Image: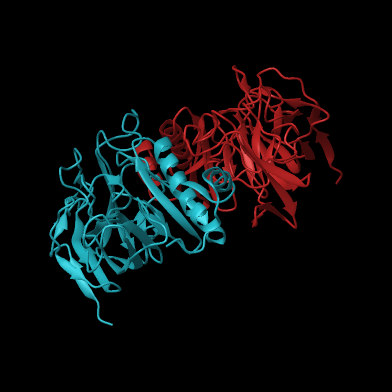
Chain colours: A cyan, B red
């Protein structure tokens, strides 16, 4: 089946807003290739290119793509089928005033390290790291407020979550007609936490399938990721503790719906299996996920 | 080779203190079985037994065990060879004013759920969870201050870290002569995060090997766990953000020693592989770990 490409040349956003104009309208079930540029819009091509401060526009997200028939209350399912790097090098950088160790005297900012692509790996000095791509920024039109592509929130956005990768599906609440999907800010590799503030930032082509789940059994307020082994509720907040609370409550709601638990039993059971994981701690909100293994949660929607 | 058992009947501590009297003196390389009672000292035997407030004494840690020849600046290696549950049921509980959702109106406290042991699993209603034990509290004598067994800190203590399990080795800085190892507070299963404040608390017999690494290549200030795939720096602090910073700095120090990186390159590289993980968010300090896959870190000590 043919696959339409939607490219950053067709349009990018630097803000997820309630009212956005689509650059493409997809049918439910349609397969697309999304071409993304790197999070720094090509500004860093060598180690001499350093970034003095966080740019006003960063994490260009290709789109938005309207999905036909998506209505508020539905769930948008985005299956990530493949992510191919589209340039021959990535880059990891420090920026003054950004990242986990921004106040540490031994950490220099700005610094740029290029990570050349070689045979399915990226190089960092004499170390080779297998390419394990991450779609850093992905989201839909929010309900009311607008959010720049620097931050994550209930609509998605700069989630920087390693599970948003090949083979997994990410589910978003639909807040606005058409859902209005956009994505970019990919990494050739990234640690959970994204401590310095970046992974190996790189342009990519992403193969996705978009679908609409109408009348879902469980309503969601925030993104959920499905991996081969688990369902993971994602939450972003000012502090890790607050994000952990929300992700735990969201995971509990899924357990309650499937098993008939009350909230207390869902809380107790959720403390026995899977658990909390760190997505990122630098954006500058914190994103965490709460994983429930599929043995205990079959098909929430 | 014969194996000595050190039991909670020989002695337990509820506080890791700089000056403690050993209940047993082990030789470096000695294999021991440590018998532990459950974290609630047997107070909860049915769902009618609820815990109204956090007990003054909790997480009884069997020991302390002096290890011959361990001197300040050394590293104590504790290999966890096996953890066997030693009773036919565990228990998960909520306590008022404790746990991640302690202020949530839908979460009732106190509540007790018993988790019967059946064929290598524990039961929670009609769900079976494979036994995957965790040694919740494990540590050594601190340098100066004393810490109750409710809290984690640089000496270990209530780390509640799922990686402290069968097949892994945990390394502690030695602060005091003999190291003075103690452990207890085991779980038959626990989620990362330990959200409700407990796992399935249970008495166990733990087979360990204790060893002393003198003159380590890298000094450590906090515990490090070795799994089959990774080295993980553990850090505990008031906030998750602070714990993440410490765990990142500790992991960076290991990378710097092996690869000759400066701190900035270690920070950048650490943002590409492995990454931050949540141990627990309720004790009431937060414990996180920063994992470096063994491909990039061979043998730090």
Depth order, front residue of A7/A230: A230
Q: Position of residue A12 (x, y in %)?
A: 16, 57
The quarter of the rendered structure image containing the N terminus of chain A is bottom left
Give the number of callouts: 0
Depth order, front residue of B211/B61: B61
Q: Residue at x 39, y 60 (%)?
A: A132
Is residue B265 something one can see in this rendering?
no
Q: Position of residue B120 (x, y in %)?
A: 73, 56
B21 vs A177, left or right, is: right
Is residue B58 something one can see in this rendering?
yes
A148 vs B8, left or right, is: left
Q: Residue at x 71, y 27 (%)?
A: B180
| Quadrant of res B146 | top right
- Residue A210 in the image: above or below residue B51: below
Furthest residue to the right?
Answer: B2
Depth order, front residue of A282/B234: A282
Q: Residue at x 33, y 65 (%)?
A: A214
Q: Position of residue B300 (x, y in %)?
A: 55, 42
A236 vs B55, left or right, is: left
Q: Position of residue B177 (x, y in %)?
A: 69, 22
B10 vs A184, left or right, is: right
- Residue A4 in the image: above or below residue A237: below
The quarter of the rendered structure image containing the C terminus of chain A is bottom left
């Amino acid at each position: 089946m043919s696959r339409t490409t939607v490219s950053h040349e067709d349009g990018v956003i630097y803000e997820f807003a309630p009212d956005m104009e689509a650059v493409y309208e997809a049918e439910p079930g349609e397969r697309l290739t999304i071409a993304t540029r790197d999070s720094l819009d090509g500004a860093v091509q060598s180690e001499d290119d350093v970034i003095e401060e966080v740019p006003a526009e960063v994490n260009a997200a290709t789109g938005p793509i309207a999905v036909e028939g998506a209505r508020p209350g539905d769930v948008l399912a985005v299956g990530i089928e493949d992510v191919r790097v589209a340039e021959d090098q990535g880059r990891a950088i420090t920026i003054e005033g950004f990242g986990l160790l921004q106040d540490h005297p031994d950490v220099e900012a700005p610094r740029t390290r290029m990570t050349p692509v070689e045979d399915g790996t990226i190089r960092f000095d004499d170390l080779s790291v297998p390419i394990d791509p991450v779609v850093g920024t992905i989201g839909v039109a929010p309900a009311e407020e607008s959010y720049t592509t620097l931050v994550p929130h209930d609509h998605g956005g700069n989630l920087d979550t390693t599970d948003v990768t090949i083979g997994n599906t990410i589910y978003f609440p639909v807040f606005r007609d058409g859902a209005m999907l956009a994505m970019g800010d990919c990494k050739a590799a990234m640690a959970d936490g994204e401590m310095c503030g970046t992974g190996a930032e790189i342009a990519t082509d992403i193969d996705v399938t978009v679908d609409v789940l109408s009348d879902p059994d469980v309503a969601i307020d925030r993104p959920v990721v499905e991996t081969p082994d688990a369902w993971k509720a994602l939450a972003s907040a000012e502090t890790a503790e607050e994000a952990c609370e929300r992700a735990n409550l969201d995971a509990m709601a899924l357990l309650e719906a499937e098993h008939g638990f009350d909230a207390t039993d869902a809380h107790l059971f959720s403390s026995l299996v899977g658990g909390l994981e760190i997505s990122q701690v630098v954006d500058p909100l914190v994103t965490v996920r709460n994983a429930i293994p599929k043995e205990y949660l079959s098909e929430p929607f």
